[in-house]
């Protein structure tokens, strides 16, 4: 009688407002250039921006008064807005957006950086819109066709650093923190590692204004 293969445990990111990111059971951790980094059963990743060994935590937060990574006033509201077109609905949650600008760069006929409303769901073909939304790292963008909403992709669990930017999480890695934070997409989201986001633990693009450097 053959036995079933052991199922791999689901990786998890556990953090509190006073601690770094502790990642369990992660096999794939990559730098922005795609090179593989070593992981342990529990891997500590930096969230304050001060580590000399990014993306790993080296305890530097203790030399800067410790951590108090709470959400701050002035951040974008955690609210989903629907833009209904003839053939597709585009859903957007500015509250979890990392503002990497892939949408406005790749499909400016739909995602209009300096216009309001900033999304035109009739501005390109359905396939072009889907392809662009699937490149959104934060999960802020998703789409619906008919009565079904599409938010998740099918990928293996992985964390990859964005050069001078956040940690990009893919593959359904669970997130557990003491603020009850929930990503818009359970399959992919971005976590702040510069220490400046107003919507911690999620990235909100503050690394750009603070000229964060990593990788």
Image (tube, helix red, strand yellow):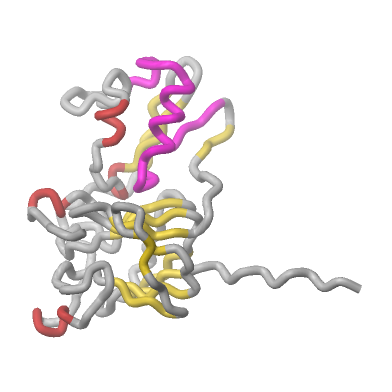
Q: Position of residue 107 (x, y in %)?
A: 31, 24
Q: Is residue 186 visible?
A: no
Residue 11 rendering spot, x and y as whole percentages: 50, 68
Residue lying at 44% horizontally and 54% vertically, measured from the top left = 170
In this picture, residue 206 sits left or right of residue 77: left
Q: Is residue 211 left or right of residue 119?
A: left
Q: Is residue 135 covered in magenta?
A: yes
Asked whether the viewer can see residue 208, the reply is: yes
Question: Where's the N terminus, which quadrant?
Answer: bottom right
Asked if the magenta segment contains residue 63, the reply would be no
Provide the residue span drawn in magenta.
120-145
x then y, percent, for residue 184: 41, 50
Towards the viewer: 171 or 95: 171
Q: Residue at x 8, y 53 (%)?
A: 211
Residue drawn at x 19%, y 77% as measured from the top left: 67
Q: How many marks?
A: 0
């Amino acid at each position: 009688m053959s036995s079933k293969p052991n199922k791999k445990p689901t990786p998890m990111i556990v953090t509190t407002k006073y601690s770094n990111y502790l990642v369990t059971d992660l096999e794939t951790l990559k730098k922005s250039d795609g090179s593989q980094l070593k992981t342990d059963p529990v891997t500590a990743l930096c969230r304050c921006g001060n580590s000399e060994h990014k993306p790993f935590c080296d305890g530097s937060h203790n030399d800067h008064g410790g951590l108090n990574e709470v959400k701050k006033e002035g951040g974008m509201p955690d609210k989903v807005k629907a833009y209904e077109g003839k053939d597709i609905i585009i859903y957007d949650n500015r509250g979890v957006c990392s503002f990497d600008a892939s949408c406005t760069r790749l499909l400016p006929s739909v995602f209009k950086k300096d216009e309001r409303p900033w999304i035109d769901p009739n501005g390109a073909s359905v396939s072009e819109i889907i392809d662009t939304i699937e490149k959104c790292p934060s999960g802020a963008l998703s789409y619906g066709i008919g009565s079904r909403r599409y938010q998740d992709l099918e990928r293996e669990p992985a964390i990859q650093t964005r050069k001078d930017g956040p940690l990009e999480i893919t593959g359904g890695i669970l997130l557990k923190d003491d603020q009850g934070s929930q990503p818009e997409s359970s399959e992919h989201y971005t976590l702040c590692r510069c220490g400046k986001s107003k919507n911690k633990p999620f990235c909100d693009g503050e690394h750009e204004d603070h000229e964060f450097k990593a990788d």
